[in-house]
Amino acid sequence: MTIRPDVGLRLQFLSRVVRKESAHLLLTDQRLFAGATPLRQTQQIENDPDIAERVEAFVGRFSRLQDTLGDKLLPVLLTALGERTASAIDNLDLAERLRLIDSADDWVVIRNLRNQMVHEYVEDPKVLIGALHAAHEFVPKLAASANKMLGEMTSRGWSDVPGIVG
């Protein structure tokens, strides 16, 4: 299947972005959650600038990768595959059927976690701690989704970088 040149260029650009975002998220996830003191208290975030910076980096990188995969790469990839794109949830359901993601339901949870980490923690820092730990559990699923999408692109010659991250 041949694709329009502009779609091919967009896929190549997004593949490079996804690889970088995935690598950065995996590194930050490891630095935030593999420490000697588990992140359990909001006081750690409020009183330790190093942890606060790691939390900010994790939230930003988790959110960016989720946005890039779900809102940018997935619709373009579906179009390149000759599929009709629709609402975000319909695109996720189609991606699940095509085995580009494991679970559309998990993606809805990931999106909600992103919103909790970005918006709601301002009101209740305990929500942030819970959301951070839940997001940490979903990092491997985000990386796996990135790998599946990149792998599909690589197998079709639509990516100028190898498909595996982390």
Image (cartoon, rainbow, N blue to C red):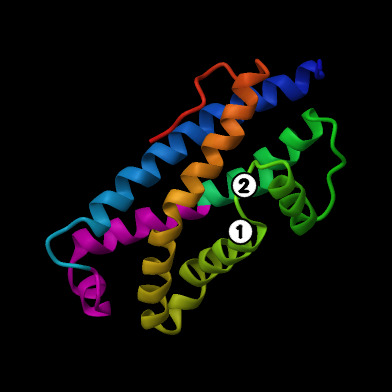
Magenta segment: does it hold 57? yes
How would you rate the neighbour count of disc 2 (Cα within 10 Å): few for under 14, some for 14-19, many for 20 or more?
many
Residue 77 pos. (x, y %): 72, 34
Q: Is residue 10 above or below residue 33?
A: above
Residue at image position (75%, 55%) is 88
29 sits left or right of 102 in the view:
left
Which of pointers 2 and 1 indicates the residue nearer the eye? 2
Q: Amino acid at mark 2?
A: Ile
Q: Quadrant of residue 7?
A: top right
The single residue placed furthest to the right in the displayed view is 84
Q: Quadrant of residue 135?
A: bottom left
11 sits left or right of 83 in the view:
left
Q: Which residue bears the numbered disc 1? A: 107
Tally of numbered tags: 2
Kindly state the secondary structure of the residue where label 2 is placed: loop
Is residue 61 visible in the rendered image? The answer is: no
Query: In this picture, which residue range is highlighted in magenta?
Result: 39-63
Residue at image position (57%, 30%) is 150
| Image quadrant in which the C terminus is located | top left
How would you rate the neighbour count of disc 1 (Cα within 10 Å): few for under 14, some for 14-19, many for 20 or more?
many
| Image quadrant in which the N terminus is located | top right
Assign the magenta stretch its main secondary structure.
Answer: helix
Residue at image position (85%, 31%) is 82
139 sits left or right of 51 in the view:
right
Magenta segment: does it hold 59? yes
Q: Which residue bears the numbered disc 2? A: 101
Q: Earlier in the sequence, mark 2 or mark 1?
A: 2
Is residue 20 visible in the rendered image? The answer is: yes
144 sits left or right of 111 in the view:
left
Q: Quadrant of residue 85?
A: top right
